[in-house]
Image (cartoon, rainbow, N blue to C red):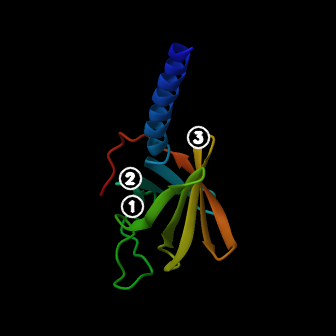
Amino acid sequence: MNMNRLIKFTFFSVFACAASMVSAKEFTGCWATVDDETKKLKSVVRITETNGVYSGRIVHLFKNQDALANLPGSPKILGLQIIRDMKRGGKGLKDGEITDPKKGKTYSCEIWRSGANLIVRGKIAFIGRNQTWLPCKNDIKFQP
């Protein structure tokens, strides 16, 4: 009977470790954003994880590579960090923020998976909107 428990414990431990390693990768990588109005591809955001904190930076624009953000100092949109301080919680990422570079506004953010896609929700209090981001190949060479 003790051997049976040991086998179950070992199996559970290996499964739990494998699940935690896979889960970190389910949000990282490159994601294509879609313009809400035109429904065309707008940009590619690379999400990275460092010590359990997730962030995202615009690494490619499909139009106007020199576009400027509506933020203090008018930085270029390309290379701008738009997702900050996200942490795992529940079935996704939460407790961070996302910046809309066109509007120059920063919102609370939640991110979760829906199949192969990411659902990104920017919100103020309980009012917000969702965007669906599409997976991209991670080996594509984008600018910063």
- The kind of secondary structure element at disc 1 is strand
Vertical arrangement, residue 10 with respect to residue 119, above or below: above
In the rendered image, residue 4, in percent from the top left (x then y), is placed at 55, 15
Nearer to me, 17 or 128: 17
Q: Position of residue 124 (x, y in %)?
A: 62, 77
Gap between marks 3 and 2, in whole Å? 17 Å
Q: Say which residue appears at 35% left-offset and 72% top-offset.
A: 76
Residue type, numbered disc 1:
Arg
Between the C-alphas of marks 3 and 1, the distance is: 20 Å
Tell me if mark 3 has few (under 14), some (14-19) or many (20+) residues whose alpha carbon lies within 10 angstroms of its own. few
Instruction: Provide the residue designation for mark 3.
Output: 116
The kind of secondary structure element at disc 3 is: loop
Which residue is under mark 1?
57
Q: Which of the 4 image quarters holds residue 77? A: bottom left
Instruction: Verify CB contact (< 8 Å) between mark 3 and mark 2.
Output: no
Q: Tag 1: Cα neighbours inside 10 Å, few (<14), some, or many (≥20)?
A: many
Disc 2: which residue: 48
| Front position among marks 1 and 2 | 2
Q: Is residue 38 visible?
A: no
Residue lying furthest front: 1
Looking at the image, which is closer to me, 131 or 40? 131
Q: Secondary structure at mark 2?
A: strand
Query: Is residue 105 or residue 15 the one in the foreground?
Result: 15
Asked if marks 3 and 1 touch (Cβ < 8 Å), the reply is: no
In this rendering, is residue 38 above or below 68? above
> Type of residue at label 3?
Ala
- Marks 1 and 2, the one that precedes in the sequence: 2
Which amino acid, by three-letter code, is at mark 2? Thr
Q: Residues within 10 Å of mark 2 (few under 14, many from 20)?
A: some
Asked whether disc 1 touches disc 2, contact meaning CB atoms under 8 Å apart, the reply is: yes
